[in-house]
Amino acid sequence: MSDAYRSMWAEMGLNLEAHDVLLGVLGNSYKEIYLAQKERPEGMGYFDFVMSEVHGLRIKELLDEKAAGRKIVGAYCVFVPEEIALAANATLVGLCSGADFAVEEVEKLLPRNTCALIKSAFGFKLGKVCPYLESADMIVGENTCDGKKKAYETLGHLVKNLYVMDLPQVKSENGRAVLQAEYFRFKAAVEALTGVTITAESLKTAIQTVNAKRKAIHRLLALRKADPAPISGLDALLANQVFFYDNPARFTASVNKICDELEKRIAEKKGAFPAKTPRILISGCPQAVPNWKLPFIVESSGAVIVGEESCVGERGTRNLTSESGQTVEEMMAAIVERYFQVDCAIFTPNAERLAHIEEMAADYKADGVIHYGLQFCQPYLMESIPVEKALEEKNIPCLRIETDYSMEDAGQLKTRIEAFVEQIKG
Ligand code: SF4
Ligand code: SF4
């Protein structure tokens, strides 16, 4: 990394030594997991570049935007509407962290039995290694699971400008009213931050920008239905992860370019894996950068991942916001409508998620489903049992995995996944 980046990180208050360690680990695992793959689409070169510059060029772009008067909003959850941030002249970046860091320090503030995702968010702050977190003018937390809800009380002492969104837990009319009120409160908070009042015109443009990004991802996901699968699950997951970081217009153009290439591959019957490779749907907790552990194990065990029922995947991107509204109120209602369909496991009851998993398994012609639950994540681990039961009733094999970010159980997971792949083949 250039000296200019090092001074940029130092000025942001990063711990350069710790940050070097993080970049070293990230670079090595990217090389071993991503660059070692065979038959990758050429268009993935763009994502390789994005990842090589994830703490470099992209951060410089964000700092340049700040210098030009834009504000940066960091978010931990897909319930934070990017449309509202964009319409008020702010850029939204995902903060959900996918690696353990500063674990000892974290466990002074959080119980050991907290999910890896929450611990990671704290570790990145305490270790001073996340330039996204440090560049954010507003950090949005949300009352979703109990772990996050209580953790934000502590995080509020560590970060500046923490804003907590109160999300409903039930898909009722009351729940919808709560979401609507919270989105209007968020709109007012972002407007106060940027000094820009959202207009019908700016909100319409923002809705179109985010929809374009989603449509590009929908196109990519649809192409994964082909056999042979034209792209690996690892590469598709990376596109879903970069969705949260990149400039929206550039991301949309790059994903569409990859889709053009994948269409040609499908026509030529060329795949990332041979035809008839067992096809897996992953369902469960979000897999944030650089959490590539499970897909790496699955795809080096003789199977290909063809879909992710996850917030870093189809749960997060599946629905568009209606573009038909003319007034700010109509468009805000459309935003509420779109996000109210997200079937996170924090909702009760949550039959929609079960139906969506079954629908995805059929659409993507999955031979089996791996339910991915992070250790200590009550909502998803609780739901994994009815999910397994429902899938088995439909004769769809299901494997429930409970893990964290460490590699300690990698050997054991590989043995279980290989046995599952053999069972599917049989
Ligand atoms: S799993 Fe639930 S809490 Fe987590 S990012 Fe998704 S919607 Fe938000
Ligand atoms: S993975 Fe589970 S426990 Fe962790 S933040 Fe998400 S919903 Fe909460």
Image (tube, helix red, strand yellow):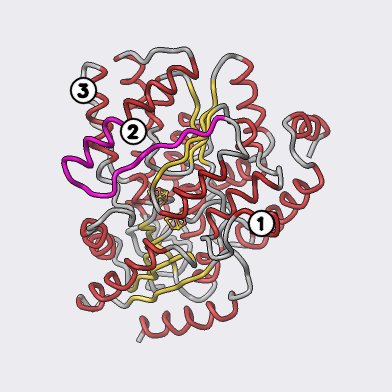
339 sits to left or right of 80: left
- Locate residue 204, reporting x and y percent: 31, 20
Q: Position of residue 35 (x, y in %)?
A: 63, 57
Q: Is residue 76 above or below residue 120?
A: above
The image shows residue 289 at horizontal and vertical percentages of: 56, 51
- Given the image, on which type of amino acid does mark 3 rest? Glu
- Alpha carbon separation for disc pair 3 and 2: 17 Å
State the residue position of label 2: 211
Q: CA distance from mark 3 to mark 1?
A: 46 Å
* Residue range of the region highlighted in magenta in the rendering: 161-182
Residue 330: assigned label: 3
Name the amino acid, label 2: Asn
Name the residue nearer the viewer: 4 or 265.
4
- At label 1, the amino acid type is Lys
Say if the magenta span includes residue 397.
Answer: no
C-alpha gap between disc 2 and disc 1: 41 Å
Q: Secondary structure at mark 2?
A: helix
Q: Which residue is mark 1?
A: 108
Q: Is residue 303 above or below residue 50?
A: below
Residue 414 visible (yes or no): yes
Q: Is residue 228 visible?
A: no
Q: Are marks 3 and 2 in contact (CB under 8 Å)?
A: no
